[in-house]
Amino acid sequence: MHFKQAIISDAPIIHKLMIRAFSEYKNDIIPSSALEETENGITKALSQEGEKALIAYESDEPVAMARFKIDNYQMNFYRLSVDPICQGQGVGKNLLKSLETYAKSNDVSEIICKVRMNIKKNIKIYKDSGYFIYDDYTIDKPNNESLHIVSMRKFI
């Protein structure tokens, strides 16, 4: 497996991986907003909004990605996506390690992410990788549902 920093023309790859990974949440009471994102929106984020992404490749096929921004000494990653056919094989953990390597080489001292509290498997993956919960909050959605979020952090 190897990792590549995305370029603007990788927006379709990023979008495809994200939609495939987040499709498992499409029937949730509150579906992920990732499913509403477009290739054009990702292109704009990469070209105009300071967003970056790492893409994981296995045999030259994209299998996972994570989008992120760096602000001062902090990396905030989001939309970490592993192709469903590759889930459970350590791809996500390897992507987290690659993000950490990238962060260290860019003088980042902490990495943060936000996770839905009800997605225990993702929280466990992050905890197993050295992240800890440092905050939690609730977002009230228009359909009178509440979305519980935890913020997780790792110092590197």
Image (cartoon, rainbow, N blue to C red):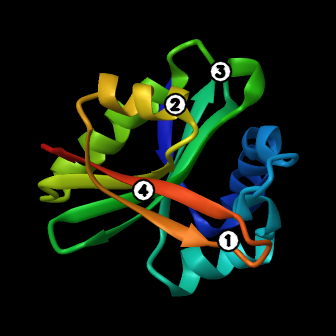
Q: Is residue 149 above or below residue 24?
A: below
Tally of marks: 4
Q: Earlier in the sequence, mark 4 or mark 2?
A: 4
Q: Residues within 10 Å of mark 2 (few under 14, many from 20)?
A: few
Q: Earlier in the sequence, mark 2 or mark 3?
A: 3
Left or right of 62 on screen, residue 26: right
* Residue in the picture at 57% in, 40% down: 118
Kind of residue sitting beneath label 4 = Phe
Real-space Cα distance between discs 2 and 3? 15 Å
Residue on which the image places disc 3: 87
Kind of residue sitting beneath label 2 = Lys
* Residue in the picture at 44% in, 34% down: 123
Real-space Cα distance between discs 4 and 1? 14 Å
Q: Nearer the viewer, mark 1 or mark 3?
A: 3
Real-space Cα distance between discs 4 and 2? 18 Å
Point out the residue furthest to the front here: 144
Which secondary structure, mark 2? helix
Residue on which the image places disc 1: 42
Q: Is residue 74 above or below residue 57?
A: below
Q: Earlier in the sequence, mark 3 or mark 4?
A: 4
Kind of residue sitting beneath label 1 = Ile
Q: Earlier in the sequence, mark 2 or mark 1?
A: 1
Residue on which the image places disc 2: 120
Q: Nearer the viewer, mark 2 or mark 3?
A: 2
Real-space Cα distance between discs 2 and 1? 27 Å
Foreground of the two, 143 or 107: 143
- Disc number at residue 77? 4
Task: Pinpoint residue 98: horizontal percent, then vertical percent.
Answer: 36, 36
Task: Pinpoint residue 68: horizontal percent, then vertical percent.
Answer: 44, 61
